[in-house]
Image (cartoon, helix red, strand yellow):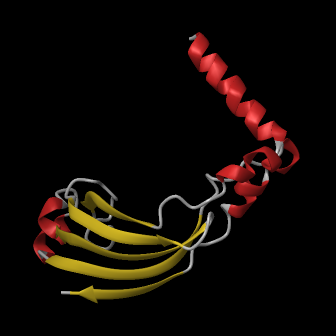
Amino acid sequence: MTKKILAAVFLVTVCISGNKTLQAQDAVVQEGEFGIGVGAGHYFGDLNTRAKFNRAKVAASIFFRKNLGNYIALRVGASFAQLGYSDKYNTHNQYMLERNLSFNSKVWELTLQGDFNFSGLCLEIRHLVLPLISLLVPVYSATILMLT
């Protein structure tokens, strides 16, 4: 418990002291990084009118991020997801059961985007609201989708 308190006090002290004491640590250590992601994709729409998470399918992504400085990076990524649904899962609606529509699709995505990293910033107390305001800025990315 005392180690956690000491670590918190140290972190607050470093942040309050300002950026002048941290100038020796401004060098970019890593030039780039690879990443992977695995998750689930799910369809919501005309066939799934109750927005239930009952037919999730596999989704995966990979990316490479090139750090251009301490705070700015360029990211290239690719994602894949399987989506599908069927009227046979809508047991609450007789019309949908009789309609009997279904689909299964594979979705591929290529992305090129810019990143701004706030985690490296150690701001003074009066500037702590800056990262919260910046989260409202939308992320712009160039995306190419291919449905199969």
Q: Position of residue 69 (x, y in %)?
A: 61, 69
Can you name the residue that lies furthest to the front here? 24
Q: Quadrant of the C terminus?
A: bottom left
Displayed quadrant of residue 90? bottom left
Depth check, front residue: 87 or 8: 8
> Is 63 on the left-hand or right-hand side of 115?
left
Q: How many marks?
A: 0
Above or below, 78 against 117 in this view is: below
**Residue 43, can we see it?**
no
Q: Position of residue 9 (x, y in %)?
A: 71, 24
> Is 21 on the left-hand or right-hand side of 102?
right
> Is 96 on the left-hand or right-hand side of 61?
left
Q: Position of residue 35 (x, y in %)?
A: 34, 62
Q: Quadrant of the N terminus?
A: top right
Q: Residue at x 88, y 46 (%)?
A: 126
**Residue 88, can we see it?**
yes
Q: Residue at x 26, y 58 (%)?
A: 38
> Is 116 on the left-hand or right-hand side of 122?
left
Q: Residue at x 19, y 78 (%)?
A: 106
